[in-house]
Image (tube, rainbow, N blue to C red):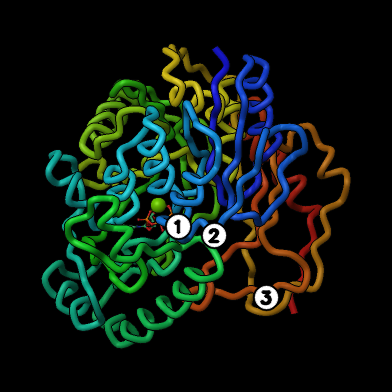
Amino acid sequence: MAKNILLVTGSDYSSDVYQAFYDVKKLGHSLFLLSDGSFEPEAGVFEQHFTYDLRKTKETLDYMKQQNVMFDAVTIKTSEWLTPLTALLVKQYNCIGNEPIVAFNCRSKYHMRQELEKGGVSIPKFQLCRNYEEILDAIHKIGIPCVAKPVGGNASYGTFMIQNEEDLESLQENYERSIEYLKKKAIDEDVFAFNAEEMDLIGVNDHVDMITDYLVEEFMAGSEISVDALTQNGETTIMGIEDQIRMKPPYFLQLAAMLPYLCTGEELEEIKVLVSKTVTAMGIKNSASHTEIIFTPEGPKIVEIGCRIGGDDLHDTILAVTGYNLMFESIMIALGEKRNYDVKTKCHTRMEFIMPKKAGIITKIDIPDVVKNNSDILNIDLLLHEGDSVGLPPDNFEYIGYISGKGKTPEDAKKNLQEVLDKIKIEIE
Ligand SMILES: Nc1ncnc2c1ncn2[C@@H]1O[C@H](COP(=O)(O)OP(=O)(O)OP(=O)(O)O)[C@@H](O)[C@H]1O
Ligand SMILES: [Mg+2]
């Protein structure tokens, strides 16, 4: 039977994601889009494109109620900040997906830590801090080294490490400059705060300020991976594990990623158990998830989990590596179609972020056509353009873009990517 499917998003999709939409339409279903109106989707894909200021959760729900359409499924690709809204819409139309409180618990790092603690999942020690004085107090309780991060952050914005006693001298300035940056982001872009009414609607008992409230956590030393998984009726399957390379402390911006993660069968089993336990502890029953793990000397611990598909190039690289389109799979799960997976490695991928080397204005970005037309290149995504200003943490946590490539082996993928990286010219003045 033909179904109405609503997609919620904060940004446009890649061609691999559009392919999922075409495949869903071929099954006879109709697609609808809800966005903030910041882009024009490909023509002919969506029956209707609803646009609203999606930061206003309650208003958006009312706006959708006024539309004369009922939906059989509501889902999302990656927009982390829209996962609670998506869950509220799932509830509004009585569809399959996450409970609003589950999505919120994944959004607020404080609530996430509480749920994981209750579920007996390995996590670092943590403490909620409402202001600078509380951060200072938490650092003394948890001990140095530790990490301070905004409760509602994403993309590591505003996250920094306290490595030694000297770092305490710049702590107040670091915190204040970070929240200054986050406040700007909250208004302009995707670091998103909920008001009291919205938190009540979601069913949040202890309210948090997603921007100025911080968590101080015990520092987890070790290498880091992210795991994209699909959960259907509480059963979790791992679809992709990404090996991450991050900046050296005190900041944690991701620099590069490799897929698949190379490990022993034993290690893979350990990751599977940990991810399933994490998904269950959070109450995720029917959706994609993206979990970050650090391998500490005491064993793997959870950094965080999102109830959505991983960001940046992950959707497309997982498709290249496994042949599975996670957007298509997420829609099938939202429709309640029973899925079975047999995940195999078809190639290796490597992605590198293009980071500004200094603060200034981008005067030139030159990506020659040979790079764009290279069949080993999967994805080139520029978030900033000529004329945009760039900076370095803690004043600015943004990267210019990223590029990913593939190969038969990890070495091959690295070589193919390096060849094109050498041809890209970026000038900052
Ligand atoms: N307790 C910790 N110990 C060590 N490193 C940490 C800790 N918490 C966070 N980090 C580092 O900071 C990064 C960002 O933290 P986290 O994932 O919680 O925030 P985020 O803003 O959602 O980040 P992103 O979107 O980059 O994944 C982590 O991927 C990890 O590298
Ligand atoms: Mg993270």
Give, as a three-letter code, the residue at label 1: Glu
Residue 242 x/y as whole percent: 47, 38
* Badge 1 vs badge 2, beta-carbon distance below 8 Å: yes
Corner quadrant of residue 351: top right
Residue name at image x 28 percent, y 58 percent:
199
Ligand 1 contact, mark 1 (Cβ < 8 Å) = no
Number of numbered discs visible in the structure rendering: 3
Q: Residue at x 59, y 75 (%)?
A: 391
Q: Is residue 324 visible?
A: yes
Foreground of the two, 312 or 349: 312
Mark 1 or 3, nearer chain start: 1
Mark drawn on residue 53: 2
* Horizontal and vertical percent position of residue 46: 67, 34
Quadrant in which the C terminus appears: bottom right
Look at the picture and state if 308 lies above or below 188.
above
Residue at which label 1 appears: 59
